[in-house]
């Protein structure tokens, strides 16, 4: 019997994503691709996380936006290394954009890299960047039906943040319905209901993130 061997052809984007990952691994940086619709609170989550990082853990940020430096400037005021990508109309980040952004950052001196994707729940999910983790930031004002409407995005999340959780009751947000929708496409990702504004729930997300960071360092040490 003759087996047909199909050679796996990586897309040009995926090949660059693999190079990005190798570069991040070489400098022991854990990278997180942060995806969400506009206004869900990606930048707010990054800042709330930065405010609570244990002493000695340093982070950097890549900001992706269609236009403007508003978010990057806000992050820079905290003394966090940040580089802005303006996609000029492209509605997602891709791996070559990240490759160029990595050149601008002091990777040797940071442990965590947040990559804030363009606000869009569709195509950012389709472009590998080389990040280790992908998270989706949903928010209560968007409604509890988002996992049903954007299954591709929620399917690939390693964790789901539900921001603006201080408004759960006011908005009549149905948490059980939201979670059922998520579980239809993603059996394992934890949900962190939190509020970047009040700070409630942020510690649980941070604890999960730091466990991933430590795990990453352990496996790097074990393979060294
Ligand atoms: Mg933002
Ligand atoms: Zn796009």
Image (spheres, grey):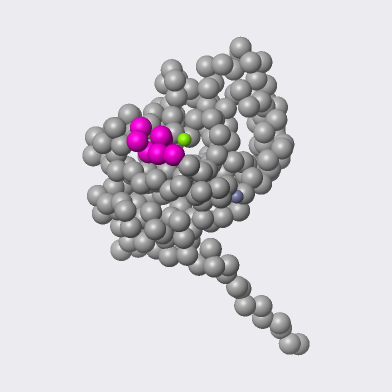
Q: In the displayed orientation, state which residue is furthest to the top.
A: 170
Q: The magenta stretch spans which residues?
A: 68-74
Seen from the viewer's position, the closer of residues 96 and 192 is 96
Quadrant occupied by the C terminus: bottom left
Q: In the displayed orientation, state which residue is furthest to the bottom.
A: 1
Seen from the viewer's position, the closer of residues 88 and 153 is 88
Indicate whether residue 178 is drawn in magenta.
Answer: no
Q: Which residue lies at the image location 57% right of the left edge and 44% below the top edge?
A: 157
In the figure, is residue 54 to the left or right of 89?
left
Residue 127 screen position, x and y as percent: 56, 55
Q: Which residue lies at the image location 51% right of the left edge and 48% below the top edge?
A: 88
Q: Which residue lies at the image location 42% right of the left edge and 43% below the top edge?
A: 63
Q: Is residue 10 above or below residue 34?
A: below
Indicate whether residue 73 is drawn in magenta.
Answer: yes
Question: Quarter of the image holding residue 51?
Answer: top left
* Residue 139 visible in the shown view: yes
């Amino acid at each position: 019997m003759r087996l047909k061997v199909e050679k796996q052809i990586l897309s040009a984007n995926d090949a660059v994503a693999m190079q990005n990952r190798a570069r991040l691994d070489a400098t022991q940086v854990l990278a997180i691709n942060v995806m969400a619709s506009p206004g869900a609170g990606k930048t707010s989550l990054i800042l709330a996380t930065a405010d609570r990082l244990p002493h000695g853990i340093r982070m950097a940020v890549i900001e992706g936006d269609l236009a403007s430096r508003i978010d990057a400037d806000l992050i820079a005021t905290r003394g966090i290394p940040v580089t802005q990508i303006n996609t000029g109309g492209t509605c997602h980040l891709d791996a070559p954009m990240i490759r160029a952004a990595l050149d601008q950052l002091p990777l040797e001196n940071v442990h965590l890299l947040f990559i804030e994707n363009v606000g869009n729940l569709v195509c950012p999910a389709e472009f590998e960047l080389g990040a280790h983790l992908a998270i989706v930031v949903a928010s209560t004002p968007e409604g509890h039906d988002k996992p049903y409407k954007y299954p591709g995005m929620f399917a690939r999340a390693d964790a789901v943040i539900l921001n603006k959780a201080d408004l759960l009751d006011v908005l009549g947000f149905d948490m059980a319905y939201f979670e059922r929708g998520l579980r239809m496409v993603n059996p394992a990702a934890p949900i962190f209901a939190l509020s970047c504004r009040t700070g409630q729930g942020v510690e649980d997300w941070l604890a999960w993130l730091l466990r991933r960071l430590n795990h990453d360092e352990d496996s790097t040490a074990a393979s060294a």
